[in-house]
Image: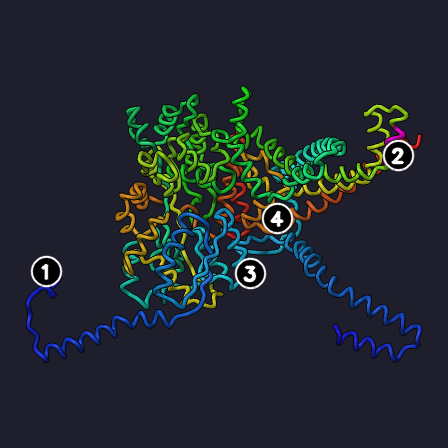
């Protein structure tokens, strides 16, 4: 430890010259030091922020808002949360109308290609370049695979249209106490998952060994796609001119649906109508004990929500047992962008920078973000707060393997919805596996044809 | 508007007195109609025409640059779409079942309430409450109540020694679950209207029927139902159109699933909208418009025929 920390305690003598020099230096330093504060105080306006309501999105923003208001007293942040299930549609419709109602939009990365196609997003590069140390810190801390989701196209060096204070990837939630009790280790492959689900299911006790968010539409679509990806599948033969042929009626697609069907006998009763709310509730109340492909959430490590907080842990999602099999959790997360039609872009940028600053601007921001259900994309925050959010360890493990949860094309949302509907039909035995996969291929071909991909 | 009125007044000066008066009246009529017409055009006619235009476009909200004219392609796609026909079938099943249930239960409830002397106002107030609950809030509440492992419905069934069900998570009971919720909410509405109609029946007619020693069944068949027909027609129509358009309750409770077990027309159309296919969505809307109009006309004709028959029977 260096002596200077104890400087004031040491007996010292100061000459007049030293005193004058020191005073001038102090004045100069204080002027430099306070310059940004003066700039902050001078900046003014209202930034209307569109975001999903509740945990991960609204609550962390509310937590860091008082700190922001202190630093930027003349900028008013007006949070406008909407139910998460409706956010995607609402923002697409709003941006189609070129509204200037929002200055910051905090929304799903899957929308970036479509929003960019509408010309709805402001490039953030010039804003980032105003503060190179901050820019470099952000880009070094957020894994490129995640940061690139907010570029169009999703490649390093492409223009950046959003920053993400909210990383996410699918992870496996499981009950360590029950796995230990049964002498089982966490399944690595899907056949092992089926065995574990069978072993853990005890219907007489109301205990189910498998839970998943299989509600009709995009929820079921993501789950199917996650399993298919883990068998080495992809949506298209190649994502370039001459390609774009759907690849659902293939071995990985078949294996994915077959796996999910084999898990149905051990599935928690709510599975076929479950969104994240229902699945998390089932894991929290103990009726579900293993969710091999769940989205990250703080509630399962929070003793206010579940008495199993101490024994629920997270790990990477299973992989397909075939040669092409790999761990392929889907990568989610939401990012912030400034709509092209915003009239207060500078204030909007300051809010985005604040929410994304981690420990860089002020460690209190990162702490407030995490402690209020935030789920950062910055690896430094994940590592720092694993002790209070054990599932962050699962996220850290998942990020390097994660694949985008949708293809980065404007039609991705439409396709995800369609494959989800077909998945739901297969899981309820309304359609055979073959018919559902054929339905996916035909539907997607139709969508891509309408959008001119085959011209 | 005052400027227009001034112009109209000046124009009047050039016309003979009688024609002038008629012309002034005409102008005034148009002036008075103008705001309503403007609103009608802006809020109803223009959107309808625009939806018609959209229905002929191949247009995806998420890739607007690829939009192009498609003629009747959207309509053809819908006609070939098995989900579309499934949604029409489910809408019919849902509407006919819930409207029948609500009319029967509402009528019974109205009859009981019409005989209650004490606290009838308080009872009416309590019974009508579900009508004022937001369908979203109600849908969420029912969703939690129907939850298979922690929901109160299965708990009560288990306490009574009855078999429990998957309710909204199973294909067999999901639609009946939604029907129960809808019936719970709208039966009081039917009951209140029928109660008002029942109370409007002149007491001397009922008295005369009693003197003639008509049984309750005879009284219902010969007197009460025929006298309620005009009100019944209105109630059936309101509930039928409402139930065909049902959206919020189903969307909140099941989103059309599991599988396609609750995929009623409005929900299917909304999922098409959510996936950005606004051309097909508009075509779907137009088909539903035609379908509802044809159905309403058919129901009206059927009810009118039944009413004529009952009135003839009453006259005899």
Q: Which mark is residue B204?
A: 2
Q: What residue is drawn where x is 41% and y is 66%?
A: A75
Q: Which mark is residue A249?
A: none
The residue to which callout 4 is attached is: B280
Left or right: residue A230 versus residue A380 is right
CA separation in Å, label 3 and label 4: 20 Å
On screen, B282 above or below A6? above
CA separation in Å, label 1 and label 4: 72 Å
Q: Residues within 10 Å of mark 3 (few under 14, many from 20)?
A: few
Q: What residue is drawn where x is 46% and y is 60%?
A: A78
The residue to which callout 1 is attached is: A2
Q: Is residue B208 magenta?
A: yes
Q: What residue is drawn where x is 19% and y is 74%?
A: A26
On screen, A24 above or below B306? below
Asked which secondary structure carries label 3, the reply is loop
Q: What residue is drawn where x is 38% and y is 27%?
A: A197
Q: Are marks 3 and 2 on the same chain?
A: no
Chain of the residue displaying label 2: B
- Residue range in magenta is B203-209
Judge depth for marks 1 and 3 and give the one in front: 1
Q: Residues within 10 Å of mark 4 (few under 14, many from 20)?
A: many
The residue to which callout 3 is attached is: A97
Asked which secondary structure carries label 2, the reply is helix
Q: Is residue B312 magenta?
A: no
């Amino acid at each position: 430890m260096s002596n200077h920390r104890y400087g004031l305690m040491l007996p010292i003598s100061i000459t007049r010259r030293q005193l004058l020099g020191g005073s001038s230096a102090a004045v100069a330093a204080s002027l430099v030091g306070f310059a940004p504060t003066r700039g902050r105080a001078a900046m003014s306006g209202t930034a209307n922020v569109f975001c999903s309501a509740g945990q991960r999105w609204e609550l962390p923003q509310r937590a860091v808002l008082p700190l922001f208001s202190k630093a930027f007293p003349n900028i008013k942040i007006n949070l406008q949360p909407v139910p998460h299930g409706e956010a995607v549609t609402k923002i697409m419709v709003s941006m189609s109308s070129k509204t200037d109602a929002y200055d910051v939009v905090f929304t799903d990365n899957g929308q970036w290609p479509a929003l960019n196609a509408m010309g709805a997003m402001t490039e953030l590069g010039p804003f980032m370049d105003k503060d190179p140390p901050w820019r470099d810190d952000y880009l070094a801390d957020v894994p490129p695979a995640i940061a690139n989701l907010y570029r169009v196209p999703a490649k390093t060096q492409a223009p950046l249209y959003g920053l993400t204070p909210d990383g996410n990837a699918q992870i496996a939630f499981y009950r360590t106490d029950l796995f230990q009790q049964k002498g089982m280790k966490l399944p690595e492959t899907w056949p092992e998952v089926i065995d574990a689900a069978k072993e853990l299911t005890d219907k007489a006790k109301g205990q189910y060994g498998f839970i998943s968010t299989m509600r009709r539409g995009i929820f079921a679509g993501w789950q199917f796609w996650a399993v298919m990806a883990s068998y080495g599948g992809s949506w298209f033969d190649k994502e370039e001119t001459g390609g774009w042929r759907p690849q659902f009626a293939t071995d990985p697609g078949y294996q994915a649906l077959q796996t999910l069907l084999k898990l149905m006998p051990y599935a928690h009763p709510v599975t076929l109508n479950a969104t994240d709310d229902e699945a998390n509730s089932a894991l929290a109340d103990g009726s579900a004990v293993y969710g091999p492909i769940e989205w990250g959430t703080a509630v399962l490590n929070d003793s206010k929500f579940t008495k199993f907080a101490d024994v629920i842990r997270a790990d990477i999602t299973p992989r397909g047992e075939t040669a092409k099999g790999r761990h392929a959790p889907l990568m989610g997360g939401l990012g912030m962008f400034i709509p092209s039609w915003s009239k207060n872009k500078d204030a909007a940028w300051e809010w985005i920078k604040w929410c994304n600053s981690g420990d860089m601007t002020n460690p209190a921001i990162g702490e407030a973000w995490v402690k209020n259900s935030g789920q950062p994309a910055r690896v430094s925050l994940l590592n720092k707060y694993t002790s209070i959010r054990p599932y962050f360890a699962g996220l850290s493990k998942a990020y390097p393997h994660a694949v985008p949860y949708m293809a980065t094309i404007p039609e991705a949302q439409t396709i995800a919805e369609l494959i989800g509907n077909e998945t739901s039909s297969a899981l309820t035995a309304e359609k055979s596996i073959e018919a559902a996969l054929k339905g996916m291929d035909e539907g997607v071909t139709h969508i891509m044809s309408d959008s001119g991909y085959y011209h | 508007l005052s400027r227009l009125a001034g112009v109209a007044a000046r124009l009047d000066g050039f016309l003979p007195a009688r024609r002038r008066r008629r012309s002034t009246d005409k102008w005034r009529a148009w002036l008075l109609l103008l705001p309503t017409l403007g609103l009608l055009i802006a809020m109803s006619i223009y959107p309808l025409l625009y939806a018609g235009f959209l229905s002929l476009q191949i247009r995806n909200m998420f890739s607007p640059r690829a939009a192009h004219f498609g003629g009747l392609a959207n309509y053809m796609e819908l006609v070939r779409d098995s989900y579309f026909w499934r949604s029409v079938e489910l809408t019919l099943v849902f509407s006919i079942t819930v409207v029948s249930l609500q009319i029967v239960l509402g009528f019974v409830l109205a009859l009981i309430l019409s005989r209650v002397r004490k606290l009838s106002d308080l009872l009416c107030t309590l019974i009508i409450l579900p009508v004022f609950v937001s369908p979203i809030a109600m849908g969420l509440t029912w969703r939690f109540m129907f939850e298979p492992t922690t929901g109160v419905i299965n708990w009560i069934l288990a306490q009574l020694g009855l078999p429990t069900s998957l309710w909204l998570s199973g294909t067999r009971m999901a639609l009946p679950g939604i029907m129960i919720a809808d019936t719970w909410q709208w039966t009081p509405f039917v009951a209140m209207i029928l109660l008002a109609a029942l109370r409007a029946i002149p007491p001397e007619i009922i008295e005369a029927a009693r003197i003639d020693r008509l049984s309750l069944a005879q009284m219902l068949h010969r007197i009460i139902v025929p006298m309620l027909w005009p009100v019944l027609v209105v109630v059936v129509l309101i509930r039928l159109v409402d139930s065909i358009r049902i959206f919020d309750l189903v969307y909140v409770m099941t989103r059309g699933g599991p599988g396609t077990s609750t995929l009623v027309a409005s929900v299917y159309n909304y999922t098409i909208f959510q996936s950005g296919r606004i051309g097909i969505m508009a075509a779907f809307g137009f088909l539903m418009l035609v379908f509802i109009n044809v159905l309403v006309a058919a129901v009206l004709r059927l009810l009118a025929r039944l009413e004529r028959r009952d009135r003839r029977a009453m006259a005899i």
